[in-house]
Image: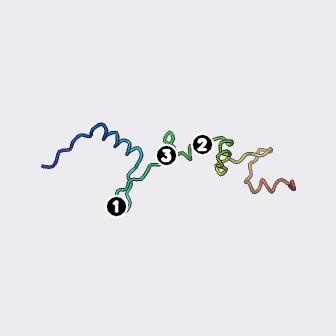
Amino acid sequence: MGKQKRKLSARERAAKRERNRKFMTIFINGKQKRVRREPTIDGIPVEEFIRQNADPIWLHQNEMWEDMQEQPDESGQTFPREQRDTENDIPF
């Protein structure tokens, strides 16, 4: 007969829940490895949450210019940055 399994104590169960929350198990070359989970906010990755909810001022203050949306010009059309700069005939 094999050895009987014992019940985990409350402290061991809490540590197991914490490990499962922080790490996920993946297979690499047929072996199990533990890797840290990506941080999430409401189940969405942090970068995606920021992209959806940040306003342009906050993005500018945190130097996240690549995530800023294109703003329409006075005619209501949006242009890529290169076209916007060359479209204006202002010499300075």
Residue, x 40% and y 50% (percent of image)?
24
**Residue 30, disc:** 1
Q: Amino acid at mark 1?
A: Gly
Residue, x 51% and y 41% (percent of image)?
41
Say which residue label 2 marks. 52
Say which residue label 3 marks. 39
Q: Residue 73 at what x, y percent from top left?
A: 78, 46
Q: Residue 82 at what x, y percent from top left?
A: 75, 57
**Picture quarter containing residue 72?**
top right
Q: Earlier in the sequence, mark 1 or mark 2?
A: 1
Report crowding for label 2: few under 14, some 14 to 19, many 20 or more residues within 10 A (C-alpha). Answer: few
In the displayed orientation, state which residue is furthest to the bottom: 29
Q: Amino acid at mark 2?
A: Gln
Q: Could you tell me if the residues under marks 2 and 3 are in contact, i.e. CB atoms within 8 Å?
A: no
Question: Is label 1 in a helix, a strand or a loop?
Answer: loop
How many angstroms separate mark 2 from mark 3 (CA)?
Answer: 16 Å
Residue, x 37% and y 45% (percent of image)?
19
* Image quadrant where one finds the C terminus: bottom right
Q: Judge depth for marks 2 and 3 and give the one in front.
A: 3
38 with respect to 13 (left or right): right
**Picture quarter containing residue 51?**
top right
In the displayed orientation, state which residue is furthest to the front: 11
